Amino acid sequence: MKHSYKLSDAIHILTYVDIYKNDDLSSARIAASIEANASVVRNLMSKLKKAGLLNNQPGVARASLAKPASEISVLDVYRAITSTASLLHVDPKTNPNC
């Protein structure tokens, strides 16, 4: 099974934006820090913005957290980047009487 790094990358992006708030916050620069393509970073940043966790504007390398880092939970980030509502999936072949 291939592992997804979206959650850790999204947390990294938020952390990077907070720590380096006065530096170059271009998607290319952030992508270099996670060894990913800049389009991956832009996609995650878009989801984080839609969830109200990040402020940014296309074409401007000046992102910021939408609220204090202490008010952002891992669950908030997970919900922002995940298209499915449930965290755990039960095997449909499991005996329901067990």
Image (cartoon, rainbow, N blue to C red):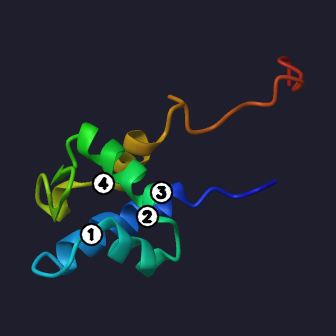
Gap between marks 1 and 4, in whole Å? 24 Å
**SS of the residue under disc 4:** loop
Given the image, on which type of amino acid does mark 1 rest?
A: Ser
Disc 4 target residue: 73
Compare residues 53 and 92 and report the one nearer the observer: 53
Callout 2–callout 1 Cβ contact below 8 Å: yes
Quadrant holding the C terminus: top right
**SS of the residue under disc 2:** helix
Which mark is first along the chain, 4 or 1?
Answer: 1
Disc 1 target residue: 26
Residue 74: percent from left, percent from top: 37, 55
Label 2 crowd (10 A; few <14 / some 14-19 / many >=20): some
Disc 3 target residue: 40
Gap between marks 2 and 1, in whole Å? 9 Å
Which mark is first along the chain, 4 or 3?
Answer: 3
Q: Residue at x 24, y 45 (%)?
A: 49
Quadrant in which residue 14 is drawn? bottom left
Q: Nearer the viewer, mark 3 or mark 4?
A: 3
Given the image, on which type of amino acid does mark 4 rest?
A: Ser
| Residue 55: image tag | none
Callout 2–callout 3 Cβ contact below 8 Å: yes
Disc 2 target residue: 38
**SS of the residue under disc 3:** helix
Quadrant holding the N terminus: bottom right
Gap between marks 2 and 3, in whole Å? 5 Å
Residue 8: percent from left, percent from top: 48, 64
Label 1 crowd (10 A; few <14 / some 14-19 / many >=20): some
**SS of the residue under disc 1:** loop
